[in-house]
Image (cartoon, rainbow, N blue to C red):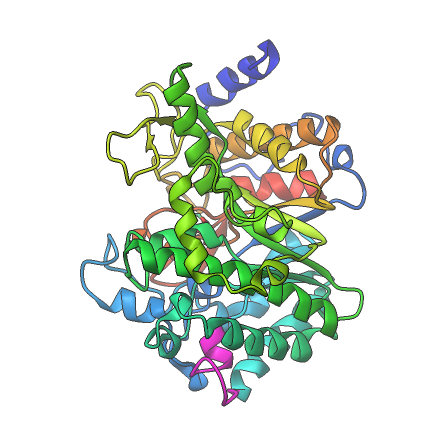
Amino acid sequence: MNKLSFLRYLTSSSSFGRNKNVNLEPVVDSNELRKTDFGNDFYWGVATAAYQIEGAWNQHGKGESVWDRFTNKPGNVKDNTHGKVATDFYNRYPDDLQLLKSLNFDNFRFSFSWPRILPNGTGQINEKGIDFYNRMIDASLELGIEPWAMLYHWDLPQKLEDQGGWSNRDMIGWFSEYADLCSRKFGDRIRHWMVLNEPASFTTLGYLSGMHAPQQSGIAKFLSSVHHACLCQAAGGRIIRNNVKNSHVGTSFSCAFTEPQKKSARHHRASQRLDVMLNRLFIEPSLGMGYPYRELPFLKKIDKYIFPEDHENLKFEFDFIGVQSYFRVISKPSLLPLIWANRVKPHRTAEVTEMGWEVSPDGMYDIIMQFSKYNVKELIISENGAAFPDTLVNGRVNDQQRISYFKRYLHNVLRAKKDGANVTGYFAWTFVDNFEWDEGNRPRFGIVYNDFDTQERTVKDSGLWFRDLLG
Ligand code: GAL
């Protein structure tokens, strides 16, 4: 960290908790970070996901998803909340989109709920589900907001999970049918598409550790799911490009810059292994590099699931890669042979978010530079943000720490851009506080506060900060 950013770091962290009075004046000196520094064609947006916002879990013919099933089981979600209502975006989208526009955002990332469109996963189409997305997309466009569609953000139809879900090779056919349907129905109005949200997260948490839906575990389920997700990622890309004129097709990866705790060769190897799992496993096959076995030999077992034609089918040249990064990871070797490395907890003096994630703006720079070494056309920061314990006082949420977080991360995005990385957009996670998976409603990531009892929205100071930056 250089002197200037160190100073900025000190001043911003020392201002927490001040300024409690309601004050609708701009909350930041706009000279500090300028929209124009990022270029006139830079995409500024917010990112959301169907299960986390829509609610309406059984309205108008929607089928059950693995997350409906998971959240129904007591104890699975830390605060016992669920996504049955979430932020009720299904019914409140017109107001939410207007609010988004009033904060000067021009891009809105959402995901389609697969079981809302195809309740059984394949076959019978739910026209009311199609109708909802048509209305929502049209409302965005009328406001001058560009919709960015994500095909899959984790809410798999339960009917498909009953047949093995991602660990079943039939997934390639199921997913292709779904991708074909969405791109045909909505491709006349949507140009920007993304195929999978963070395959490393949903395969690791859903099919290896079982911490997330559908609570499956084991190496075989994990490796087969990884391979099928890689094949679907490429197949989805091809289908969209084929069906949508002038499409801008990407997919997203969860990434975290990894560093060894110590300089020893063992620590270095541990860090490389974690880097494979966190950052390389899903992008390299799509670039024709195959699976990164060398640093993590246990991945060789994936060969069992590879058919000869797959080598070619894994490849797809995306128009952009969505980088989703929140923190860096420090690693140390593990004594257990099956585990690739251990993560070291952030130091007790480190600034952490409510999720326990270390605030590491330099890590954003490093991971962008790492990804920009791959031969990809564009990088888009398709998610970044932070949960902090917000309080609503006299109609205001004074979330200076979140503003400081965004400023520091955005400075590092800019720094990477200046150093040659082709970053073309930034999407804040997230718009309105929503349902945070197994953590429930407690962690608030939004730039807009949500009262989950009344569904009343209050723009946080960070929302006003974005409004002023983008205005
Ligand atoms: C991402 C995920 C989002 C959101 C975010 C914050 O991994 O794609 O759905 O939950 O993390 O935790």
Image quarter in which the N terminus is found: top right
Q: Nearer the viewer, residue 266 or 207?
A: 266
x 73%, y 38%: residue: 422
Q: Is residue 406 above or below residue 181?
A: above
Q: Which residues are magenta?
A: 113-126
x 61%, y 79%: residue: 181
Q: Is residue 49 visible?
A: no
Q: Is residue 382 above or below residue 86?
A: above
In the displayed structure, does residue 27 sit left or right of residue 386? right
x 49%, y 52%: residue: 198
Q: Position of residue 377 (x, y in %)?
A: 74, 46
In the displayed structure, does residue 357 sit left or right of residue 294? left
Q: Nearer the viewer, residue 40 or 150?
A: 150
In the displayed structure, does residue 461 sit left or right of residue 158? right
Q: Position of residue 332 (x, y in %)?
A: 34, 25
x 53%, y 58%: residue: 230
Q: Is residue 134 above or below residue 303?
A: below
Q: Is residue 8 above or below residue 127?
A: above
Q: Position of residue 174 (x, y in %)?
A: 50, 77
Q: Position of residue 205 (x, y in %)?
A: 34, 53
Examine the residues drawn in magenta and state their main secondary structure.
Answer: loop
